[in-house]
Image (cartoon, rainbow, N blue to C red):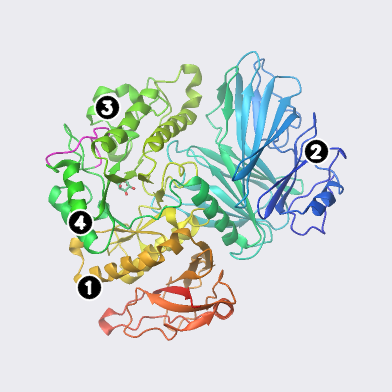
Amino acid sequence: MNIFKLTNVSTAFFLLLCSNANAQFYNLSTPGTSLVIEAPQNGEAKLIYYGTKLSENELNEIKSSGFNSFSAYPVYGMNCQSETALAVKHYDGNMSLQMEVINVEKTNNEDYVQTTLTLKDKIYPLYVNINYKAYNKVDMIETWSEITNKEKGTVTLNQFSSGYMPIRRGNVWLSSLYGSWANEGRLCQEELTPGMKIIKNKDGVRNSHTAHAEVMFSLDGKPQENNGRTIGAALCYGGNYKLRIDTDDSEYHHFFAGINEENSAYNLKKNETFTTPVLAFTYSEEGLSGASRNFHKWGREYKLANGNKERKILLNSWEGVYFDINQQGMEQMINDISSMGGELFVMDDGWFGNKYQRNTDNSSLGDWTVDKKKLPQGIEGLIKASKKNNIDFGIWIEPEMTNTKSELYEKHPEWIIKSPKREATTGRGGTQLVLDMGNPEVQDFVYEIVDKLMTENPEIDYIKWDANMGIINHGSNYLTNDNQSHLYIEYHRGFEKVCQRIRNKYPELTIQACASGGGRANYGYLPYFDEFWVSDNTDALQRIYMQWGTSYFFPAIAMASHISATPNHQTFRTIPLKYRIDVAMSGRLGMEIQPKNMTQEEKELCRKAISEYKTIRPIVQFGDIYRLKSPYDKDGVASLMYVSPEKDKAVFYWWKTETFVNQHLPVITMKGLNPEKRYMVKELNRIDNEPLVFEGKTFTGKFLMSKGLEIPYTHKVDYHKLNDYASRVLYIEEVK
Ligand code: GLA
């Protein structure tokens, strides 16, 4: 391979020699980054550069510096040894592709410039549009492809990635998220070594419990939070995905991301176009946190439903009462959250079912009528109680599912996903089944669950949309025998259609994506959802690790984070309320507890925290994240902060993650402040008998960022209140 290495453009992470002096170059740019593409008429489309923004001069240097070798969208057939983005079988059985540029089109929009390269196979009328959307207010470039079949018959798509990116070798590290139920969003950081790294999902319904479809590449060795060139990538898709990083014998790592093609070969009919999900890229020279800030800005502005609207502080009934729903109990909780200053109450599972009462997880999904024995006044009664308490009301549903013990299943056994000729495999409760979302009748049914709830109770403010089962057995009663391999893809097409209909009619409704906890943290869902439940695990200490990882890609406004009971219901760990509050306050604050069991003192602490959260809410929910000290470093402390875009306000979090007598913890220096400005420091959620030495004092941004504050390792509280936890939340405000 003829690769010329350019060393004087230090910021470029890949730069290849170009073969055609007259080639057409396209510089797709965002405020701080450039992606340069070479697209010669009747030649191959190639990626030349992705990195820091190039001036016209630098672009010229690149143009005159050499020849490009990597295709913008590698295809299978004429270079069989390499990994590819697209592999097909033509209508006549031919397995090869050779694509040439036939057109390039640019369209300007207020927020972005979209460049579309149209490629055509040299022999066959198979067309691929490669789209790039470069945002002009945030450093994000989205890419996706559209594959159109104009051949005489069906073309089989065997591989159909959303996009590709070559990354120059040289101590490149990968950060990715892995986990499992109740342990989602764990951070894994590893050096890329020869061979193939695959990150994938096959759940069928949800896709972020065990691994995430987002990654970061640190180009300057071991990942650093606030330094170093970093590329971030997020596949925006709710279904099965596959990310591949091939470190072959070339000078590059080859990154591909798209729908997981396993058992999903797609039969593209004549004249049909297949559109892949979006793959979004960002680049930052401010380390992982810099890339996160780009994801968060883009996420809030362009992806997340209602990303610019503050989220309410809520109480969810689940861990407080589980299935034990009744009018009196709900009213008590409504009362309690309202008296603590909360703004919303959400009734979780257990409120529905007529013929079969939902008292445990083995029945009634699909029977979305109020259980009048539990709630004689219906949802209306609860909305009334909420209004009386000046708060809003929300409700839990799990619309994509049913149970064998349900009226729905009795009526529509053909609506479930099941292997033909075989018994259905059941999930939760031994009876749960997934509805076939590819079936338009099922889509209508699911849409109507929400529409009926909202039409009958227009004051419902919030819906928690759950999904507690994946696709276990393969088979659709709706799809033809030929198209059974479309099951996963059609499920998500159907799901999106329903979501679009709901959003068109109810744009303001807050909807949480829950899926046995954090199974739906992906930008493919977020255009329809305002937030997601990070995990069913509400243990504050474990949440620090999970929320740390999740924050790599998702803003705090989307991360539901609740104060729960102690001992914790998942880990059985006993953590003091102060610490539980201080962790929950770093995301979208809520409560998941039975207030009836709290002492007056505990309620008072929560009341204070809720009131203080209201002050810092705009900074947490709309500010810039700076992760300062990772819990994964195992240095005994974790710390991060959010800074307002004007840099006049910030919130600093410090959580001790382990306790040893006379241990030595690092001093945390802050980031993201204006060095020239003076800031006053005020502790929130204070429990100590005396204020901190720096309470109410002012410091320059420079001081806070270079020297930092000495945070005491323990709390000064009465002897009987001492425990092994310590945490601080500091509010930092500019003094003029
Ligand atoms: C899932 C969710 C929980 C709760 C239960 C209700 O497990 O993740 O938060 O809503 O379902 O059954």
Residue 423 percent coordinates (x, y): 34, 25
Q: Secondary structure at mark 1?
A: helix
Q: Which residue is mark 4?
A: 389
What segment is highlighted magenta in the picture? 361-373
Task: Mark 1 and mark 3 in contact? Answer it, CB < 8 Å.
Answer: no
Amino acid bearing label 1: Glu
Indicate which label's residue lies in the foreground, 4 or 2. 4
Indicate left or right for 322 with 736 as reference: left
Indicate which label's residue lies in the foreground, 4 or 3. 4
Q: Secondary structure at mark 4?
A: loop
Amino acid bearing label 2: Gln
Amino acid bearing label 4: Asn
Which circle's residue, 4 or 3, is located before the other in the chain?
4
Identify the image quadrant of the N terminus: top right
How far separated are the C-alphas under marks 4 and 3? 38 Å
Q: Is mark 2 within 8 Å of ligand 1?
A: no
Residue 24: image tag: 2
Q: Which residue is mark 1?
A: 601
Which circle's residue, 1 or 3, is located before the other in the chain?
3
Indicate left or right for 35 with 629 as reference: right
Which circle's residue, 3 or 2, is located before the other in the chain?
2
- Rendering quarter of residue 542: bottom left
- How would you rate the neighbour count of disc 2 (Cα within 10 Å): few for under 14, some for 14-19, many for 20 or more? some
**Vertical placement of 472 versus 181: above or below?**
above
- Rendering quarter of residue 9: bottom right
Q: Which residue is mark 3?
A: 409
Observer-nearest of 25 and 569: 25
Task: Mark 1 and mark 4 in contact? Answer it, CB < 8 Å.
Answer: no
Q: Secondary structure at mark 2?
A: loop
